[in-house]
C-alpha cells in the first residue's frame, strides 16, 4: 500500500487538493497501515495465548483424570493448526503446514511429559523431556529459517523457558501447590506474549509492503 501512495504523491494526484485535505488523507493511510500492524500483533497474541491457555486446560484435565481431557486435547491441537494457518499469507501453504506439524508434535510430546510426571515415571519423563526440547529446537530453526530477522538462539531460549515453566506448572499442580501453579502460569503467559510480539514484529519488518 505504501508504494502505491508514494507513487500517487510523486505524480501529484493529491497536489490539487487543499493542504488540510491532503494531510488528512495521508494521515488516514498511515493510520490504516498502523491498524494492519496492530491487527497482526493482536491476532498473533490471541493464537499464542490460546496455546498456553489450552495447554493449561489440558494439564488440569489430564492430571484430574477428567472425561473432558480428550476434547480439550482436540481443541489444543486445533490451535496448532490455526497458528500454522496464520503463516500461510506470508510464507505459503507448505510452510504453514510444516509449522503446524511441528507444533502438533510439540503438544503430543507435552502430553507424554504430563503423563510421565503424573505417574512418577522418571525414565519416561526424561526421555519425553529430551524429545520435547529437540522439537523446540526444530521449531526455532524453522521460524528463523523462514524469517532471518528472528534470532534462532533467542527463539530457542524462549521455547526452553516455555517448556521449563510448563513443566513447573505441571509439577506444582501434582503437588497441589496452587500458589506456585498460578504464579508460574502468569509468568508463562507473559513470556509467551513477548514471543508472540517478536514473531509479529519480525513479520512486519520482513514484509513492509504488506503493512
Image (cartoon, rainbow, N blue to C red):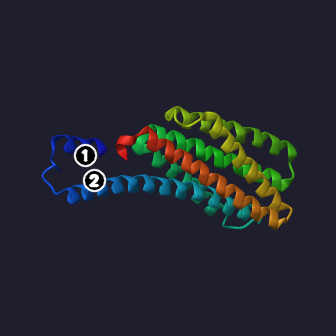
| Closer to viewer: mark 2 or mark 1 | 2
Q: How many marks?
A: 2
Instruction: Report which quarter residue 21 is drawn in.
Output: bottom left
Name the foreground residue: 171 vs 69: 171
Q: Residue furthest front?
A: 19
Q: Is residue 143 visible?
A: yes
Q: Position of residue 188 (x, y in %)?
A: 69, 55
Residue beneath disc 1: 5
Q: Is residue 63 visible?
A: no
Q: Position of residue 113 (x, y in %)?
A: 76, 49
User: Quick one: SS at disc 1?
Assistant: helix
Q: Residue furthest left?
A: 16
What is the number of the mark on residue 202?
none
Instruction: Report which quarter residue 122 is drawn in.
Output: top right
The answer to whether the residues at label 2 and label 1 have Cβ atoms under 8 Å apart is yes
Which residue occupies 63% across, 61% down? 53
Q: Position of residue 161 (x, y in %)?
A: 72, 46
Name the foreground residue: 32 vs 40: 32
Residue beneath disc 2: 26
Amino acid at each position: 500500500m505504501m508504494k502505491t501512495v508514494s507513487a500517487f504523491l510523486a505524480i501529484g494526484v493529491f497536489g490539487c487538493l487543499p493542504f488540510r485535505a491532503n494531510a488528512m488523507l495521508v494521515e488516514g493511510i498511515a493510520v490504516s497501515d498502523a491498524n494492519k500492524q496492530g491487527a497482526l500483533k493482536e491476532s498473533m497474541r490471541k493464537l499464542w495465548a490460546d496455546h498456553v491457555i489450552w495447554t493449561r486446560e489440558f494439564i488440569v484435565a489430564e492430571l484430574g483424570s477428567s472425561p473432558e481431557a480428550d476434547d480439550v486435547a482436540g481443541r489444543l491441537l486445533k490451535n496448532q493448526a490455526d497458528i500454522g494457518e496464520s503463516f500461510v499469507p506470508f510464507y505459503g501453504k507448505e510452510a504453514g503446514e510444516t509449522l503446524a506439524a511441528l507444533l502438533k508434535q510439540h503438544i503430543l510430546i507435552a502430553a507424554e511429559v504430563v503423563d510421565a510426571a503424573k505417574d512418577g515415571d522418571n525414565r519416561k519423563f526424561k526421555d519425553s523431556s529430551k524429545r520435547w526440547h529437540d522439537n523446540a529446537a526444530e521449531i526455532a530453526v524453522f521460524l528463523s529459517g523462514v524469517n532471518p530477522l528472528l534470532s534462532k538462539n533467542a527463539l530457542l531460549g524462549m521455547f526452553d523457558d516455555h517448556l521449563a515453566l510448563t513443566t513447573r506448572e505441571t509439577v506444582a499442580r501434582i503437588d497441589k501447590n496452587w500458589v506456585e501453579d498460578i504464579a508460574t502460569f502468569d509468568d508463562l503467559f507473559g513470556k509467551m506474549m513477548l514471543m508472540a510480539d517478536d514473531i509479529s514484529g519480525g513479520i512486519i519488518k520482513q514484509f513492509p509492503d504488506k503493512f
